């Protein structure tokens, strides 16, 4: 599904990755852990082609990706939930935001409307269609952002701090959705309990490298 080989990346003189390697299989449910500033979000952006490594290979869905058109082809197939919901929501209403992806993938307006209804229902957001996006609470924005990702019927999910702004009840709802889904995913989260309940494999970024990890005694 995703393979990174010998990735080097930095911001100016600050080196973030120094020969990082990562391999993710389709059914993996991966928890990605690490301290602030270690490069967790940067890694997601490299996978999605929003940042380009200084050297190394990014191989997604069986092909090496180097150009913008290479990455554009996979962005509907790898669903990416941004850390900040305001980076994901840009339409006036919920229905417009969630329908945007399906419409751009060729669905008719009627098909997209059905997709929106089904996706919102799965997240217990039925009735939100006409809500004004910028008036939603932080937790509601988080769930609607996830709906925009799921509406595109991706093959794999990358979720960057998915529980931000969610209360305990809504977090439990999200966990239930992930467990019921057949999708593989990679989750970035500082919420150890959430990671423990959703991931079947853990890795830790430290000193620019990937290391296998467990939750017990892990240095965050």
Image (cartoon, rainbow, N blue to C red):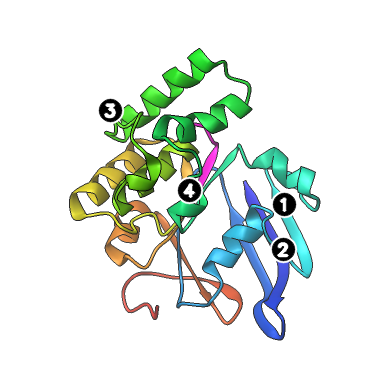
Mark 3: few/some/many CA within 10 Å (<14, 14-19, 20+): few
| Residue bearing mark 1 | 59
| Residue bearing mark 3 | 127
Spot occupied by residue 7 in the image (x, y as percentages of width and height):
71, 68
Q: Quadrant of residue 187?
A: bottom left
Spot occupied by residue 117 in the image (x, y as percentages of width and height):
37, 23
Nearest the eye: 203 or 45:
45
- In this rendering, the answer to whether 215 lies above or below 172 is below
Confirm whether residue 179 shows in the render: yes
Identify the mark nearer the N-term, 3 or 4.
Answer: 3
Helix, strand or loop at disc 4? strand
Nearest the eye: 193 or 151:
151
Q: How many marks?
A: 4
Q: Are marks 2 and 1 in contact (CB under 8 Å)?
A: yes
Spot occupied by residue 175 in the image (x, y as percentages of width and height):
30, 47
Identify the mark nearer the N-term, 4 or 2.
Answer: 2
**Distance from the alpha carbon under mark 2 to that under mark 3:** 45 Å
């Amino acid at each position: 599904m995703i393979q990174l080989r010998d990735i080097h990346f930095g911001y100016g003189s600050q080196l973030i990755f120094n020969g990082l390697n990562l391999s993710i299989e389709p059914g993996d449910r991966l928890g990605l852990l690490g301290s602030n500033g270690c490069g967790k979000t940067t890694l997601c952006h490299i996978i999605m082609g929003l940042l380009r490594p200084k050297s190394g290979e990014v191989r997604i869905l069986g092909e090496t990706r180097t150009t913008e058109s290479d990455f554009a082809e996979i962005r509907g197939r790898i669903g990416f939930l941004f850390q900040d919901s305001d980076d994901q929501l840009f339409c006036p209403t919920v229905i417009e935001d969630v329908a945007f992806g399906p419409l751009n993938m060729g669905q008719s307006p009627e098909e997209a409307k059905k997709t929106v209804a089904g996706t919102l229902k799965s997240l217990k957001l039925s009735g939100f269609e006409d809500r004004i996006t910028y008036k939603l609470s932080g937790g509601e924005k988080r769930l609607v952002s996830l709906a925009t990702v799921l509406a595109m019927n991706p093959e794999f999910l990358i979720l960057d701090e998915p529980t931000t702004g969610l209360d305990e009840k809504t977090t439990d709802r999200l966990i239930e959705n992930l467990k019921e889904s057949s999708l593989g995913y990679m989750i970035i989260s500082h919420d150890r309990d959430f990671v423990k309940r959703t991931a079947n494999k853990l890795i830790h970024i430290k000193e620019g490298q990937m290391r296998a990890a467990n939750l017990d005694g892990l240095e965050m």
